[in-house]
Image: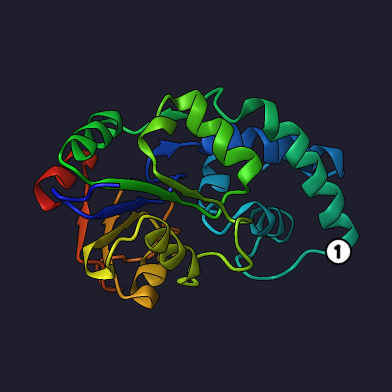
Amino acid sequence: MSMAGGGLALFDLDGTLVDSAPDIADAVDIALAAVGRAPLGEDQVRGMIGNGAVRLMHRALTGTRDEDAEPTLHATAYAQFVDAYQPRVYRRTRLFPGVAEVLATLGARGWALGVVTNKPARFTLPLLEQAGIAHHFAVTLSGDSLPTKKPDPAPLLHAAAQVAAPLEKVVMVGDSLADLHAAQNAGVRAICVSFGYHGGADLGAAGAERVIDDFRDLLTLL
């Protein structure tokens, strides 16, 4: 893996590379209906995404960010979510503007590219394939690839080790505090996008090197 021209650029998936909230919201609402709950709709679900599907269902059931739902209820709803989301990972989901162009350009410049997401692998890999961008990535780590996930630094450190990238040449690009804190915990650069699922967090104030409004701005920063 040559990194003569760049380093290793790691990308979050949901809210960074793709706007997946429409499909995720559809699956959440199907799961909620299955356990007798009212639908939340896309706008509400959009604000709950970011820490993996298990936490997403806790948020959908409790209406809070950090409380856990009753275990049996959660297990039932989560199973329904998985069944509903699997066939619709790329039904209404779309790449954000500029993503395909930026990935191709960075690759041509000699950057190694990776995905580090908290999304379960059973969804990550089909989504990347159906979005037509899987071939860009030398390494892909999902929320269940390792014992811990973002904001733990382990997935970022593991990805860097897989392509033998020195940490000073690694950048994490994401949309949430989980991404930013993972980068800070790993000691790598952190660039955030403003258009994802940040849950209202001020990523600039939290220490992002830059917060960009257009994915194509990466080409001047990297």
Q: Indicate whether 40 appears above or below 145.
A: above
Q: Colour mode? A: rainbow
Answer whether residue 196 is visible to the viewer in this image: no
**Residue at point 30%, 47% (across, down):** 1
Residue 221 left/right relative to 161: left
The image shows residue 117 at horizontal and vertical percentages of 49, 52
Q: Position of residue 182 (x, y in %)?
A: 42, 69
Q: Choose top left, top right, bottom left or bottom right for residue 95.
A: top left
> What count of labels does the image hold?
1
Name the residue tied to disc 1: 71
How many C-alpha atoms fall within 10 Å of the one at disc 1: few (<14), some, or many (≥20)? few
Query: x and y percent of residue 189 in the render?
Result: 25, 66
Residue 128 in view of the camera: yes
Kindly indicate the quadrant of the structure image that contains residue 84: top right
**As drawn, which residue projects farthest toward the left?**
220
What residue is drawn where x is 32% and y is 46%? 113
Q: Looking at the image, which is closer to me, 125 or 75?
A: 125
Q: Amino acid at mark 1?
A: Pro
Q: Is residue 6 left or right of residue 92?
A: left
Residue 178 at x, y percent in the picture: 45, 65
Residue positioned 27% across, 36% down in the render: 103
Residue sitting at 20 percent across and 66 percent down? 209
In the image, 4 versus 198, the foreground residue is: 4
Which of the 4 image quarters holds residue 59? bottom right
205 and 180: which one is in front? 180
In the visual, does 192 lie left or right of 12?
left
**211 above or below 84?**
below
What secondary structure is marked by label 1?
helix
